[in-house]
Amino acid sequence: MTVETFDVGIVGAGVHGASAAFHLASRGVRVVIFERWTPAGGPTGRSSAVCRAYYTNTFLAAAARDSIAMMERFQELTGVDAGFRRTGMLFLHPPEDVFDVEASAERLNRLGVSIALFDPGRFVQEYPEFDRDGIGVAALERDAGYADPHATTEGLFRRAVELGAAARMGERVVGLEPSERGVTVTTDGGTASSCGRVLIAAGPWTAPLAAQVGANLPLTVERHVVATFRWAGADPTPAHADLIGGYYFRPEGEDLYLVGPVHPEPRADPDAFDEEIRDDEIRRLAEAVVRRVPHLERSEVHGGWASLYDVSPDWQPVIGEVAPNVFVDAGTSGHGFKLAPALGRHVADLISRSADLDPRLAEFDPFRFSRGSALSAGYRDAWILG
């Protein structure tokens, strides 16, 4: 059997694996990408693909800011239109968040992420369609928006291949065997590849793969839903995240909008979970939305779906070396899409052991939990805001 040799093997062609491949291949690194399905064939393709830099963590805010900048130039960079649409996004907070929101907004504005704050009185003047109940402060990120998750992943993946990356689609990785020379990657088709280094970016399937090289990662998997509605007789409403009501909301094209939860949801088996959204799940989200924006009662249910989040204990990414020459980029806990395009550059620096590696990336060490170094991020139990 012929064993091909590569500098880096990447397990997973979701948006994180595709981004790392893009940045590595751009540097002339010989990369191979393994994916059991097709690019964005897993949770990435079911992402609501919100693009916002409204983070409490400075490194993640900067990565998301830079990802939005990449989205604006995406066709130039990859030859593919990512479908990025700038909508702005409102974040509605209860009174107990006011102090932290003001401090965060000041940091974000210094980073070049444009945030405007509204007290409840001014908020209802600017946005009279919203009910102000429970709102202590509202933050507007002016440059936020959304993109097409399939097109974004396909653009990064396709450009990586054009730059020399090898693609092994339809091949599920079943074995990782470290050696002095690197890591041998075996697939369910019986092929083996020798890779100097390996990145596991397999989302909900990352932890079992990492366990093969002796790394016990405390990642869990949750089932999260997205409900879709037609505007019908309702007037279009701005994109927003209601931390009091527990949901996020964004338009989808001209006719639809999407709604999903911002809090933890039930755990799931990534190989056997209900991919359909239930009527009671749609109803729960619809009721929350109508409480906040009453005129949306005139909109109509369109459908929806369920997907998976790979979740870390603090809902922040796990990024780092977990065994000699084996790295992970996972645990992004439902907010990974918006980070991925620019974060891939930092992951490429890590794998390449580049002198340009941002030292702040060490915050996301996969073994931080055993040291009691979980990150503090988000607001109360809305850790997904990062």
Image: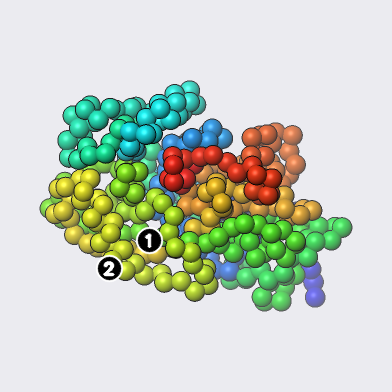
**Is the residue 209 above or below the residue 134 in the image?**
below
Residue 91 screen position, x and y as percent: 34, 38
Left or right position of 187 against 45: right
Left or right position of 21 against 44: right
Residue 300 screen position, x and y as percent: 19, 59
**Is the residue 265 above or below the residue 60 in the image?**
below
Which residue is depicted at the point 56% across and 35% down? 59
Q: Residues within 10 Å of mark 2 (few under 14, many from 20)?
A: few
Residue 39 screen position, x and y as percent: 53, 61
Q: Quickly name the residue at label 1.
A: 225
Labels in figure, total: 2
Q: Is residue 40 visible?
A: no
Which residue is depicted at the point 34% across and 49% down? 246
214 or 259: nearer the eye?
214
Quadrant hosting residue 121: top left
Residue 133 screen position, x and y as percent: 22, 39
CA distance separating discs 2 and 1: 11 Å
Q: Quickly name the residue at label 2.
A: 279
- Please tell me whether mark 1 sits on a helix, a strand or a loop: strand
Rendered-image quadrant of the N terminus: bottom right
Q: Residues within 10 Å of mark 1 (few under 14, many from 20)?
A: many
Quadrant hosting residue 13: bottom right
385 or 10: nearer the eye?
385
Amino acid type at circle 1 is Val
Which residue is depicted at the point 79% across and 68% down? 3
- Numbered mark located on residue 73 in the image: none
142 or 274: nearer the eye?
274
Which residue is depicted at the point 25% across and 50% down? 289
- Please tell me whether mark 2 sits on a helix, a strand or a loop: helix
